Image (tube, rainbow, N blue to C red):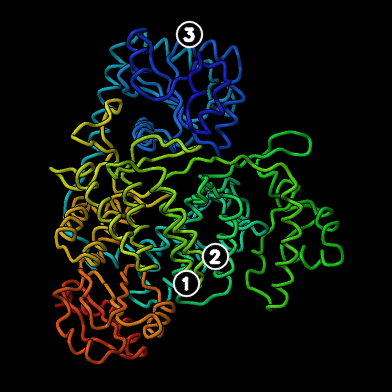
Amino acid sequence: MNLLSNETSPYLRQHKDNPVHWMPWGDEAFAKAKKEGKPVLLSIGYAACHWCHVMAHESFEDGETADLMNTLFVNVKVDREERPDVDMIYQNALSLLGQQGGWPLTMFLTPGGEPFWGGTYFPPHPRHGLPGFREVLRGVNAGFQEEGDKIAHNVKNITQALEKLQSHQQGHIVTREIMDRICARFLSMTDTVNGGLGSAPKFPNLTIVSLLWDAWLRTEADPYKASVLNALTQMCQGGICDHIGGGFCRYAVDAEWLVPHFEKMLYDNALFLSLLSEVYRETRHPLFAMRIRETVDWLLREMRVTDKEGRTAFASSLDADSMTDAGVAQEGAYYVWRAPEVDELLGDEAEAFKTAYDITGFGNWEGMNIPNRLKNPGLMDEATEQKFSALRKKLLDARQRRPAPGRDDKVLADWNGLAISGLCKAGFALDAPEYIAAAQSAFDYVVAHMSGPNKRLMHSCCEGQPAHAALLEDVTNMAAAALDLHEATGDARYAAHARDWAEILLDDYLDVENKGFFMSPAPGGKKDATLILRPKTADDTATPAGNGTAVSVLTRLFSVLGEPAYLDMAEQTASAFSGDLMQRYFPLSTLLANSFFLTRPLSILLRGSPEAVAPFVEVLRGLSLPHATVTRHDDAGGELPAGFSGKITDVKSVGDEKRAAAYICAGHSCLPPVFDAKAFRKMLMEERRDTRRAAANDG
């Protein structure tokens, strides 16, 4: 019997009519496996995953294959977006077996949940060097039933190796010398022609690109800036960017950013908003402003999930596949064009558009055209770009009459936290208060639907039904979003939310013995009994690692609230993962960036009426300061915000003068107040270059 019909996950519900007797992850499935003496077949995927759909159609919808699965295994389906902790454990297990991970993930477990063999996609029949899925099922079951000693040996080795992966070497917080060496290594890996890191398939790797941007801000070395601008320009003008509807696809299958894997994920677009906004503040590059606006427009047009009260959060993803006119599901069908279509829709203006966007009769991908501007990535004159904008709108109107890709309507707290932060940064960079309002609405949605009376978050919500206890990234990303909203609005309730979530972080997720935070919670000391271990990592994936974000959240809370305990815990978290930085720096970009800045946290206080501090705000709008915390205080003579009490000693003189003042505070002390916007900018530039810390390190 298939038990997925009552699940909230759209991905799990995609499989509710399979003849496979799927069960959701939980105690019931493992109890059944123990009772029947069967191994567990664990299949993990997500709604927008192309190859997950392929394997489902080929195998899970096939009656003969389903009968074999039902006879030999207890079958468990997991949405990796609902349970990234489960996915992490078994992706690591597959890696330890010497295989490349990915989705769909197909793992075989003992009734106790221990992995002993696995793979990813299996075809229904042997091809391309892969065994057929039915052959795999028979072979794995025979091995489990007949070679118990071998299975037990595999289980022991894999489990011990998984536990070893959990252990991290403690060390000292990253120094400027180490940061410079690591950033130089990253720079050496960049593709100087096409931008970004690596070759096909090519992922944005935005946490690494952000680290390179930090390196330029700190050193003003031109190669860092050039690498970031090249990467962002190529991605913004490549096919990975949806030039017609806005937003970015997950990755490119080639090295030139031309051919995307057409699924669109909320987290990618949130991270693009944050980084593009930071870079735009410094460069004022109109291309980046254009892509920010288009991405926000796409979010608000296609990704909204709205409740009865009008609060709007964001759905998780759009599928890579959509239906063709012939009624066949095909990857990218919604997004590609034939030249005659463009001619018919744009008339006399079609030729100029096709030339600019690389649309030809032969096509640039499998006989079809992916709009892009890689051949001439520079922008044209303003009038031409405005004309292109109107033409793109005509194509968008036509495209919206096509069968749309499926949408995964899950609201995930961690990904919405990233989106809220991205909207806050975009709203400030472009002086767009409507973006801040959208961020506030999403925040209110999460708080209303995904937190209980004990203030603990839930991870997922679909159709108004919250599910699954919050993971580390939910708590840290929403706390970071709360701090971004506090900075954007000055509303104290956001800081209160951040503080509450930080306390829950310390209560439910802290590794008391070794420091750092576990991915899954243990309220009251009780962890999820279905997990063979509690994952703990500082490695970024496609999203920033929760431990890396925790360092930033705790450091910023110190700046806002002035409580040294938060800074102490940030330092302990950073140290917990820093013992082997030079050997395994590649996945640690978020931890590295935030650990470096916690040694001298930068906070800025603007004192005076909104009108009076406006020149200082404009200075901030024109400078990239990704790790600074900004507090606005309307009353120039009133009591100081908590985070600045004890740091500022000349309150009276400012209050007497009744004029706007700005303070730049680093660590536990503040520089003298500044009353002139030009002087304020100069002081910020000096602090950003890190000259004081560099001098201390040199000495």
Q: Distance between the residues labelled 1 and 3?
A: 59 Å
- In this rendering, the count of numbered labels is 3
Point out the tag, 2 or 3, that comes first from the N-terminus.
Answer: 3
Determine the image quadrant of residue 188.
bottom left
Q: Name the residue under label 2.
A: 292
Contact (Cβ within 8 Å) of mark 2 with mark 1 = yes
Q: Mark 1 points at which residue?
A: 429
Q: Residue at x 50, y 49 (%)?
A: 309
Q: Residue at x 61, y 54 (%)?
A: 301
Residue 477 % position (x, y): 36, 52
Q: Distance between the residues labelled 2 and 3?
A: 52 Å
Observer-nearest residue: 157 or 668?
A: 668
The amino acid beneath tag 3 is: Thr
Determine the image quadrant of residue 590.
bottom left
Q: Name the residue under label 3.
A: 71
Q: Which residue is drawn at 35% across and 46% down?
A: 474
The amino acid beneath tag 2 is: Ile
Contact (Cβ within 8 Å) of mark 1 with mark 3 = no
Point out the tag, 2 or 1, that comes first from the N-terminus.
Answer: 2
